[in-house]
Image: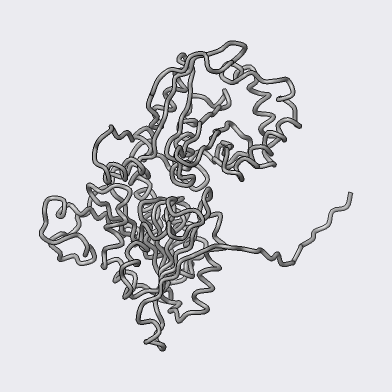
Amino acid sequence: MNSQQLRIDTQIVKSICMDYLLYVPAGYEAESSKKWPLILYLHGAGGSGMQLDQIRKEGLPARLESEPDFPFVVVAPQCPIGVFWNMREDEVMAILGEVTDNLDIDRDRVYLTGFSMGAYGVWQLAAHNRERFAAIAPVSGGGDPAFARKLGGMPTWIFHGMEDQVIRPAESEKIAEAMRSEGAEVELTLYPGLAHDCWRKVYANDGLYRWFLEHTSSGRAPLEEEEPSAAMQGERRTTVRSFAAEAVGSARPAEAPAEPDSAAAPVVQHVERPSREDGPGALGLYSDGTERLRIEPVQVGDVDGLLALELGNRDFFRMFTGTREESFYTRDEQEARVRRAVDAAAADERYLFVVRERGFDEPIGLVDLTGVSRGSLQSAWLGYFLDRAHNGKGYMTEAVRYVVRHAFEVLVLHRIEAGVMPHNEPSLRVLEKAGFLREGLSRRNVQIDGRWRDHVLLAILNPKDMAEEEKEFGGGEAIHP
């Protein structure tokens, strides 16, 4: 058979649609000759949806609603519910292009910031569009350390509350360390006593906006010229700012961290790297999984891999799953299973995730969020299984933690429930290490391997919901992480 070397050269037109808020300074019309700096803001999961009013409640827009003289043009797009910002990169950049083309914008002073889910979006958007931004400021998030190499010398100021139980500070510490290893100057500000909503402190801080204006896109060297020498790498470091002076009653608030002679001067501290078992914050969470695993929504192309997984573990899974018909172990049924899951995700009813080891294509497990309920419940059930040969490596603990974070941060669920047979101690440990608490026993509720089995009921609550409720209504009922 003859082979040919060919190339396709064509254009694909993509239709996009995304709503956004645009804030223009009160003096914009009066200063017709001025070029204005711009801030692109990416909201957290709580702002996702179809109502723009959701964006106004937190982050930078919450400040702008009552400050008409804010000296930046600010663009705040809205991400649909159920997806990450990395799935809407084209839309965001199209909005940025539309605004910069039609308003008097200083293209040399375009800045990027985001909160929580938006902070993860900041890292990805900046890594893929480095030339468009003069500086970035992610808040209460994290990102893939591999982005550090793509960002080079991008001026970066990272913020995180030290008491954050939604996304642990270790996520910011990890990518700050990666930036440092690439020779970049990066500041990491850790706020003692503040949790996930440290955005209130961050965006109220005028020092952040002065810091933005100190940086321009043209003032930064091209990426290929930014490879530091070994000597330079030895001299550079990550600055970790912890506002301890304010915590012990400093007379000067921490809203001016950019001034080193302040009475509330931040202290530089050594960041102890957590081990894998130190808790959720020790885990490297990326937009597509963890440091060791890829965890992604199931796709039609996964059918053959899932069939092989089920056939290879048929006897093993039978001990833990509901009774299955013989047709379940056919390609046709697995294809139908996958298509049902894809359709259910589009309908916001179920989310099935495929687990793989990084660097390999074969699925080794599944994590399933089923029975998604909205309205006054905002809940789902969690189920999972892992290839027998990969048990004992901590993989399922990582996968469950990742999916739980996705459920809380992206799907904006309030409660996730799970059931485990009482004798299945390894599975109980997986859930408890992921933060689930035991709530009771459901008697003879599921038929497994021909017998009706008891199940221990466990659940985990969205800590952001609990923190907000406690702040608004006081202690009352016990608040669990």
Q: Residue at x 76, y 32 (%)?
A: 332
Q: Residue at x 69, y 30 (%)?
A: 307
Could you tell me residue 224's position as x and y percent?
49, 67
Could you tell me residue 311's position as x and y percent?
68, 24
Residue extending farthest to the front is 376
Q: Quadrant of residue 183?
A: bottom left
Could you tell me residue 195's position as x and y percent?
29, 47
Q: Is residue 327 above or below residue 179?
A: above
Q: Is residue 98 above or below residue 59?
A: below
Residue 472 shows up from this direction: yes
Q: Using the image as rendered, state which of residue 282 and residue 97 is in the foreground.
A: 97
Q: Is residue 241 above or below residue 361?
A: below
Q: Residue at x 69, y 66 (%)?
A: 13
Give the number of callouts.
Answer: 0
Could you tell me residue 360's position as x and y percent?
60, 39
Residue extending farthest to the right is 1
Q: Is residue 92 left or right of residue 322?
A: left
Q: How is the image coloured?
A: one colour
